[in-house]
């Protein structure tokens, strides 16, 4: 079992920055991909960014050039630096990790609210 604890959400004005962090703990054999998703009111959860264990990143087009995902494999953490925030970035942001052991299991964090005011 893995536990994910997110931090760093909050309220910011348009154009501002926030940094989200997610710490993974528990009995973990190996973490493969790590990522961030978001869900705005009335919308489905969508991918924001992912990063592989080797550091290869993938971003949704809407955040390219503004958001940066990073991870610390020694500490089992993943972060999302969000710059030039827009009101449409307002959502609950969820951390997601792919844990490998006898089988591959996906875990989700509890979510952290990001609100961008115009």
Image (cartoon, rainbow, N blue to C red):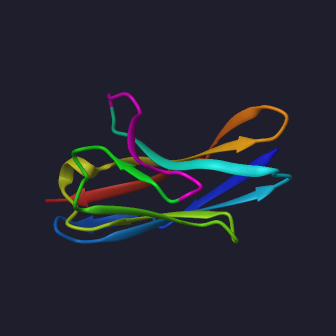
Q: At 70% from the left edge and 71% from the top edge, which residue is drawn?
A: 74
Please name whichever residue, 105 or 15, is drawn nearer the observer in this view of the structure.
105
Residue 51 place in picture, x, y as percent? 49, 53
Report which quarter residue 116 is drawn in: bottom left
- Magenta-drawn stretch contains 48: yes
Farthest residue in the left direction?
Answer: 118
Count of numbered labels shown in the rendering: 0
Placement of the N terminus among the 4 image quadrants: top right
Name the residue: 23% across, 44% down: 61
- Give the magenta range: 42-54
Percent x, y of residue 111: 53, 49
Can you say whether 44 is above or below 15 in the image? above
Left or right of 29 on screen, residue 107: left
5 displayed left or right of 62: right
Quarter occupied by the C terminus: bottom left
**Residue 94 appears in the picture as rendered:** no
In front of the other: 55 or 77: 55
Q: Position of residue 92 (x, y in %)?
A: 42, 47
Residue 42 in the image: above or below residue 78? above
Residue 18, given in percent of the width and then of the height, sits at 36, 69
Is 75 positioned to the left or the right of 84 in the image?
Answer: right
Does residue 36 appear anywhere in the picture?
Answer: yes
Determine the residue positioned at 17% across, 68% down: 15
């Amino acid at each position: 079992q893995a536990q994910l604890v997110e931090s760093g959400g909050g309220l910011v004005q348009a154009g501002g920055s926030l940094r989200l962090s997610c710490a993974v703990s528990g009995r973990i054999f190996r973490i493969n991909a790590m990522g961030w998703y978001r869900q705005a009111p009335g919308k489905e959860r969508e991918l924001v960014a992912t990063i592989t264990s080797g550091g290869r990143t993938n971003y949704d087009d809407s955040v390219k050039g503004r958001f940066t995902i990073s991870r610390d494999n020694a500490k089992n953490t993943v972060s999302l630096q969000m710059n030039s925030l827009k009101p449409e970035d307002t959502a609950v942001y969820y951390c997601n990790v792919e844990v490998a052991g006898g089988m591959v299991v996906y875990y989700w964090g509890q979510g952290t609210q990001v609100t961008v005011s115009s």
